[in-house]
């Protein structure tokens, strides 16, 4: 396998407890032709110093320091210094399998694809991490991959656990100052590709920890997903592809339920809750008839129509990661 240079961008912000484990998992890759870009996004703890120390230990690591601008801004900044033909993103509190880069590049070469994807393994602090090998892989066209992602069938919308041609990020950026930046970006990146390959190996350790972006207290920023989904639906409408429009409505429905079920009833989120209700009511019939929509989404629609109180009680016992 021709070992092209792979640039790995790692945004870093106040993760001094986790950074060493993350970087160790990157430098120990079996695929060693790497450029590792640590972007210190204005950390207030010792993360920036740790980045510099790692830069001294491994010649493949470069460290960049910048004022705090958030995850999107750090990724965009890091990509500017990427010299590889391909780029990958790793969050600085996550841990990756030593085989992930080799595996994803093997998929690209064997299937002549432009983007490769593997699965995350959901991990928790102090638990042993056991990565899982591939059972199958499948090649998609760009539109097929976008539909697969919006229907949340195989792979997540996350920017992580994927390798892309670096050139795709020349004109497409992550939106600064928003949550769910991946939802706003990855479907556009997919559309740059001719072929996208997905393998179900679980090789990216997605760490759930207290006060991470996905576990912190609900805020107005969590409602960004509603407006991102408006953009996705409008984008697909302009393409005038019935299947892509249907997939975007399914994704928007999922986002609406997320806000409706998680937003506190304290009068601060009345507009967002009302918007979510309107989305659910407007699109319920179309989504229910869509054979590609997940069963639990259809159950949620039926429960919403029959008993909202019961749906909220049931939701508390649902694992949102499955």
Image (spheres, grey):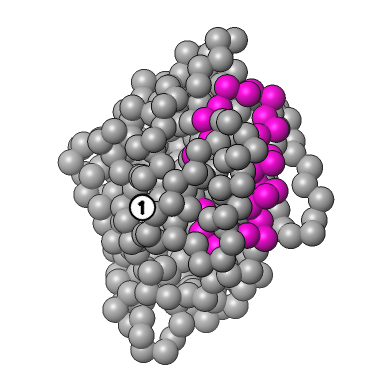
Q: Is residue 93 visible?
A: yes
Q: Residue furthest bottom?
A: 266
> Residue at horizontal 20%, vertical 37%?
240
Residue located at (43% from left, 51% from top): 65
Which image quarter: residue 178? bottom left
Residue furthest toward the top? Answer: 1
Q: Secondary structure at mark 1?
A: helix
Position of residue 141 relative to residue 244, above or below, is: above
Residue at x-position 39% and y-position 65%: 256
Q: In the image, residue 259 lies at what x, y percent?
A: 42, 70
Asked if one can make out residue 120 in the rendered structure from this viewpoint, the answer is no
Instruction: Report the number of discs.
Output: 1
Q: Label 1 neighbourhood size at 10 Å, few (<14), some (14-19), many (20+)?
A: many
For the view shown, which residue lies furthest in the front direction? 56
- Residue 80 vs residue 223, the one in the foreground: 80
Residue 108 magenta: no
- Measured as percent of width and height from the top left, residue 165 is found at 40, 26
Q: Is residue 34 magenta?
A: yes
Residue 313 spot, x, y in % from top left: 60, 78
Residue 312 sits above or below residue 148 on the image: below
Residue located farthest toward the left when viewing the structure as drawn: 238
**Region of the chain picked out in magenta, as a range:** 12-37
State the quadrant of the N terminus. Answer: top right
In the depicted structure, whether residue 287 falls above or below residue 144: below
Image spot of residue 22 (x, y percent): 65, 47
Q: Is residue 299 left or right of residue 18?
A: left
Residue at image point 63% right, 60% down: 16
Query: In this view of the protein, which residue sits in the foreground, 134 or 82?
Result: 82
Residue that label 1 marks: 73
Q: Using the image as rendered, state which of residue 261 and residue 156 is in the foreground.
A: 156
């Amino acid at each position: 396998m021709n070992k092209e240079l792979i640039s790995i961008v790692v945004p870093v912000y106040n993760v001094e407890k986790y950074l060493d484990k993350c970087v160790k998992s990157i430098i120990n890759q079996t695929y060693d032709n790497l450029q590792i870009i640590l972007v210190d996004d204005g950390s207030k703890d010792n993360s920036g110093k740790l980045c510099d120390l790692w830069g001294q230990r491994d010649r493949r690591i470069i460290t960049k320091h910048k004022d705090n601008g958030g995850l999107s801004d750090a990724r965009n900044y890091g990509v500017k210094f990427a010299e590889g033909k391909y780029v990958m993103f790793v969050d600085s509190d996550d841990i990756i399998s030593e085989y992930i880069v080799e595996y994803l590049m093997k998929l690209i070469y064997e299937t002549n694809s432009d983007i490769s994807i593997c699965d995350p393994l959901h991990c928790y602090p102090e638990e042993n991490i056991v990565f899982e090998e591939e059972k199958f892989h499948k090649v998609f066209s760009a539109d097929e991959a976008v539909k697969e992602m919006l229907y949340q069938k195989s792979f997540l919308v996350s920017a992580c656990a994927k390798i892309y041609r670096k050139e795709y990020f020349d004109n497409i950026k992550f939106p600064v100052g928003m949550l769910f930046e991946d939802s706003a970006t990855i479907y556009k990146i997919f559309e740059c590709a001719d072929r996208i390959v997905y393998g179900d190996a679980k090789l990216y350790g997605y760490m759930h920890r207290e006060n991470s972006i996905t576990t912190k207290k609900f805020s107005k920023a969590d409602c960004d997903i509603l407006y991102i989904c408006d953009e996705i639906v409008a984008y697909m409408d302009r393409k005038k592809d019935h299947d892509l429009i249907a997939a975007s409505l399914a994704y928007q429905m999922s986002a609406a339920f997320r806000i409706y079920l998680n937003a506190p009833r304290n009068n601060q989120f009345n507009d967002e809750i009302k918007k979510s209700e309107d989305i659910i009511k407007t699109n319920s019939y179309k989504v229910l008839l869509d054979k590609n929509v997940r069963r639990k989404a259809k159950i949620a629609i039926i429960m919403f129509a029959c008993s909202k109180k019961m749906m909220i009680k049931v939701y508390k016992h649902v694992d949102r990661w499955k």
